[in-house]
Image: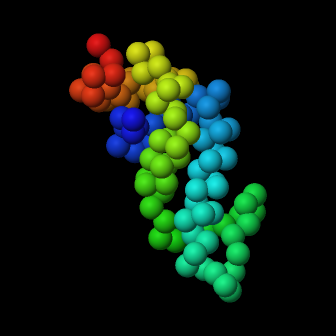
Amino acid sequence: MSSPFPGMNPYLENPELWAEVHHRLITAIAIAIAPPIRPKYRVAIEKRTYLGDVDLQSLLAQVYEQAGFDLAIDYSIEPVPALNSEDKVWADTLLKGKGLRS
């Protein structure tokens, strides 16, 4: 299942998941930018790199699906850290619309 959120999924920011999300996203970015810069440059992980034309939303969606985060996230409860009241209403409406919350 793909992430129900159109942008960053706030449930992925849970401290229980974030380290894995961060690691997988860095790796996915490195894989995505390596082909166009080779053979002149290489991509090093854990070093500062400034990105130009990388579709981070696509990479985040790919990471979400490859890692099976849909199996680790319970969308019936509020995310950790908590959302502000406006974002909470938005997320609740979105999740109800996708049948992930009643």
The count of marks equals 0
Provide residue 35's location: percent of width, then percent of height.
58, 75
Provide residue 2's location: percent of width, then percent of height.
39, 39
State the residue at coordinates (32%, 26%).
Answer: 95
Which of the two residues, 46 or 68, is positioned nearer the viewer here?
Answer: 68
Asked where in the image residue 92 lies, by quadrant, the reply is top left
Image-based side of 60 in relation to 95, left or right: right
> In this orientation, does residue 45 appear?
yes
Residue that protrudes farthest toward the left in the picture? 97
**Which color scheme did the rendering employ for the protein?**
rainbow
State the residue at coordinates (38%, 24%).
Answer: 88
Provide residue 15's location: percent of width, then percent of height.
64, 29
Q: Quadrant of the N terminus?
A: top left
**Residue 66 vertical position relative to residue 42 in the rendered view, above or below:** above
Asked where in the image residue 47 lies, by quadrant, the reply is bottom right
**Residue 92 vertical position relative to residue 18 in the rendered view, above or below:** above
Which of the two residues, 95 or 34, is positioned nearer the viewer here?
Answer: 34
Image-based side of 32 in relation to 49, left or right: left
> In this orientation, does residue 86 appear?
no
Provide residue 63's location: percent of width, then percent of height.
53, 46
**Residue 41 vertical position relative to residue 80 in the rendered view, above or below:** below
Q: Quadrant of the C terminus?
A: top left
Image-based side of 92 in relation to 67, left or right: left
State the residue at coordinates (44%, 26%).
Answer: 84
**Residue 19 vertical position relative to residue 29 in the rendered view, above or below:** above
